[in-house]
Amino acid sequence: MKILIVTQYFWPEEFRINDLALDLLKRGHDVTVLTGNPNYPKGNFYKGYGFKFKTENYKGIKIYRVPIISRGNASGLRLVLNYLSFAINGSIFAMFLRKKFNVSLVFAISPITAVYPALVHKFLFKSKVNLWVQDLWPESVSAAGKMNSSFATVCLKKMVKQIYKSSDKVLVQSEAFIPSVTDKGVSKNQLRYVPNWAEDLFNSQSNILKSKYESIIPAGFRVMFAGNIGEAQDFDSIIKAAEITKDILNIKWIIVGDGRKKSWAAEEIIRLELQDTVFLMGRYPLEEMPSFFVHADIMLLSLKDEAIFSMTIPSKVQSYLAFGKPIVGMLNGIGAEVLTKAECGYVANAGDYEMLAINIVKAYNAKSEILAQKGLNGKDYYNKNFSKEVIIDNLINIFQE
C-alpha cells in the first residue's frame, strides 16, 4: 500500500509514530510523511531546521516538512500560531502533492487540526483518511487550562464533529475515549480501538549497557519518572510526596526528562530541602531510556485529577510494562485500571500524594522477589494486551477495509 502519514510531530522528535512508520516500511509498504519542522518539546527549531520547506529521507521514508511557527514557550497565542501554521501550510502543500495514496493516517495528538492536510488531500485525490485519536478535543484543551471560554469550547466541539464526520475511520488509543467520540457523531462502523504499544527498545534488557549511567544515578531505592515534566503529570503532588519521604534518605526520586514545570520543580527541591532525595537528571534521547530504566527499583506514573486524563492511557504505561519493572501510579480511570488488572504495582488516586508516599514506602519495605514478580506480571499483561505485532496487523487490516 501507499500510505501517507500526516503528523505535526515526527523524527527527530520522539513520538511513537516514528516507530510505526518504520514498521510499515519494513512490511513492504510505501510510506510518506507530511510533517512540520521539529521544535518539540523545547519550542526552538532543532539545528538545521527553521521556518522553511524541506524534504528528507529517513531510513527509506520520504518526509515533506512544511514551514511552521515554532512553539516558543507554548504560551496561548504562540501555540495557536504553531497549530494553525501546520494546518494551513500543510493543507496548501497537500493541494499540490499529486501522488495518490491508498490511505492517510493522521497521528492526532494535540492539535487535532493536524488532520486538515489529510482531509484536503482526500477531497482532491480521494485518499481515505484514518484519524488515530491520541488526545480528545476539546476536552484536552480545557484540561490543560488553555481555554476558559464556553463559546470557544462550543466552536471547537463543532469543528471536531465535522472532522470526525469527514474522516473515513476514527481510531481511539483508549476504550474510554469511545463515549466522547460517539457523542460527537462517530458511528460504530467508523470506530476502531487501536491502542499504543512500547517501542522495540523497551522489550528486552539483554543488550543494555548497565554501567552507562550508573555513575550519575544516585544509589538507593530508586523511584524513577521518565517523560514530560508538565502540568498534566501533577508534579505539585509528586514533590509533596517526596517531601513526606525525605527522612528516608535511601529513597531516591529520579526524574528523567524535561518540560515546562522543570524550573519550578528545581526551585521547589531547593525550597523544601530535597536535594538529598530528589534528582532532576535532565532530558536524554528516547533510545537512552532503557539504560536508565534498568537502574530503577520502581517506575512512577502520574496524571492530574482531570476527567480527560482518567480516559487516557499515557504512552509511558506501555513502555513501563514492556520493560518489566514494577510501577507506582497516582492517577484515575483507565490508566489506574490497567495497573490494577496487570497486578504490576501500587496505585493511588490522582492527586493523593499522601497515598503515593505510603505506597512508595510500602514498595521500599517489600521483599525484592515481590517487586520482581510485579514487574513480570506487568510484562505478561503487556504481551497479552499491547503486542505491537498484533496491533499493527490490525491497523493494516483497517487500512484495507
Image: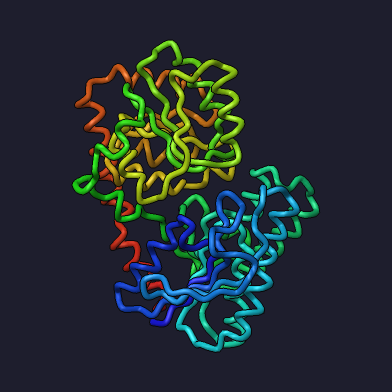
Q: Position of residue 269 (x, y in %)?
A: 54, 22
Quadrant of the snapshot with the N terminus: bottom left
| 305 is higher (above) or lower (below) than 80 | above
Q: Position of residue 130 (x, y in %)?
A: 50, 71
Question: Do we see residue 366 in this rendering?
Answer: yes
Q: Residue furthest top?
A: 247
Q: Is residue 193 left or right of residue 160?
A: left
Q: Is residue 397 left or right of residue 82?
A: left
Quadrant of the snapshot with the C terminus: bottom left
Q: Residue shown at 47%/83% (left/top)?
A: 101
Q: Is residue 130 left or right of residue 112?
A: left
**In terms of image quadrants, where is residue 340?**
top left
Count of marks placed on residues: 0
| 190 is higher (above) or lower (below) than 148 | below
Which colour scheme appears in the figure?
A: rainbow
Q: Position of residue 275 (x, y in %)?
A: 48, 20
**In terms of image quadrants, where is residue 308?**
top right
Q: Residue shown at 36%/54% (left/top)?
A: 197
In front of the other: 104 or 278: 278
**In terms of image quadrants, where is residue 222?**
top left
Q: Position of residue 317 (x, y in %)?
A: 40, 44
Q: Residue shown at 30%/17% (left/top)?
A: 365
| 263 is higher (above) or lower (below) than 93 | above
Q: Residue shown at 39%/65% (left/top)?
A: 20
Question: Do we see residue 108 in this rendering?
Answer: no
In front of the other: 252 or 245: 252
